[in-house]
Image (tube, grey):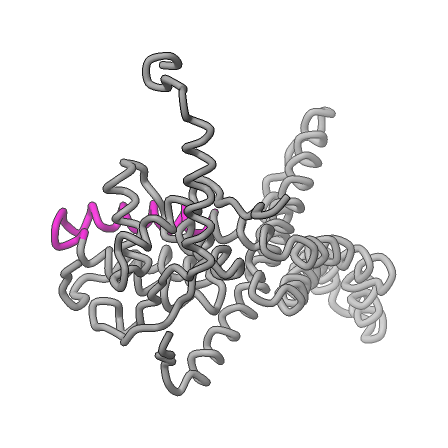
Amino acid sequence: MAGRDYLGEFEHIIVLALMRLEERAYGVTVRQEIELRTQREVSVGAVYATLDRLETKGYVKSYRGDPTPERGGRSKRFFRVTAKGVTAVNRTQRALQSMTEGLDILEGYS
Amino acid sequence: MKSQPLSVQPPRLAFWLVNLFTIPDNAEAIMGDLLEEFSYVASKSGVAHARRWYWRQALKTIAHLIYSAYRIAPWSTASAVVGGFLLPGFVIRFLGFPERAIFAVLEKYQVPDKHFNTYVFFATTGIDIGLVIVYLWVGCVIALVARGREMAAAITLCLIFAGMDGVALFAFVASGHSLLRSLLPWMFADSFAILIGAAIVRSSRSARRIGSDDGLENPAL
C-alpha cells in the first residue's frame, strides 16, 4: 500500500504546533502551544522524544539558535517541518477526515 | 516568551537528574528549555511554585527519556541490561571476587592469628564493601556499553536487582526468620551502586563533551 506513513496522535499534534509557530518553534514554545490548545500537560521530555523520532523519519529538521542568558547560556534548538512532513500531515488529516465523515461523533457517541 | 536572566536556581537534584538522563545531543536544548520556563514560572507564580513545576517536569522528562531509550535502541539497551545482570554472577562465582580475594590476602598476612578483630571485620563488612565495589564496576561497564542510554540501562538493572532483593527479603521474613536490620542497607547498596557507577561514567562523558565543545553550530537550513 502506497503512502503508509501516517503520523501518530502526538506526532500529529507536534507537527501542527510546528506549522503554527513557524520560525519560533523550539521546545518551550511547542510545549506551551500544545498545552494552550489541547489543555493537556506535556513534558519537555515527551516533546523532544517525539521531535527526535520525527527528525529520524525526515518529517522535521532542527538547527541551533544562539545561547541566551535566561537559559543559562544554552542555545535553543529550533525545528521546522520538511516537505515530507507536510505531506505526512496532509495524508493523516485526510485519513482522519475520511474516517469521521458521516459520523455524528459529538451527539452519537457522547 | 519573555523571561529574565536567571536570578533563582531550579532544584539542584532535579537539575542534576535531568542532565544525567538526557541524551548528550539533546542535553543543551532540554536543560535550556527547562531553565527558561523555570525562570518564567518563577517570575509569574513565585519560586516555590516554580520549583514544584520543575520537579514535575523533571520526573516526567526522565520517564520519557528512559522510555525513548528503549524505543530508539531496544536491542542495545536490553543487551546492556542482560550483560549487566550476568556480570556480577560471573565476577563473584567464577572469579571469586571479593570473597576469595579477601580471604587469600587475610591468610597470606596471617591476619586470623595476629589480628582477629581485623579478620572478622574483613570477613564480614569487608566482603559487603567488596560486593558494592563489584556492582559499582558493573554500573560503569554497562554505562560504557550503552552509550547515550547509560542511565536508562542502569536504572532498569537497579530496579531488577532491588526487586530481587525485595522478594528475597520478603521470603526470608515470611519463612519465620527475624530481620537483621543491619543487613538491609547492604542488600540495597548493591543496586544503588550500579546507578552510582553509571552516573560517574555519564557525568565524566558530559564533562568531556562540554570541554570539547569549542563552539555552537548554527547551520543554515
Residue A97: where, in percent of width, then height? 41, 33
Location of residue B105 by image quarter: bottom right
> Which residue extends farthest right?
B94
Seen in the picture, residue B106 relative to B47 is either above or below; the reply is below
Q: Is residue B143 magenta?
A: no
Picture quarter with the C terminus of chain B: bottom left
Picture quarter with the N terminus of chain B: bottom left
> Which residue extends farthest top?
A108
**Residue at image coords 41%, 54%:** A86
Residue B126: where, in percent of width, then height? 69, 61
> Which residue extends farthest bottom?
B214
Residue B18: where, in percent of width, then height? 41, 58
Is residue B183 visible in the rendered image? The answer is no
Q: Is residue B43 magenta?
A: yes
Asked if residue B142 lies left or right of residue B221, the reply is right
**Residue at image coords 30%, 45%:** A34
* Magenta extent: B41-63
In this rendered view, identify the residue nearer to me: A9 or A106: A106
Asked if residue B141 lies left or right of residue B107, the reply is left
Location of residue B29 by image quarter: bottom left
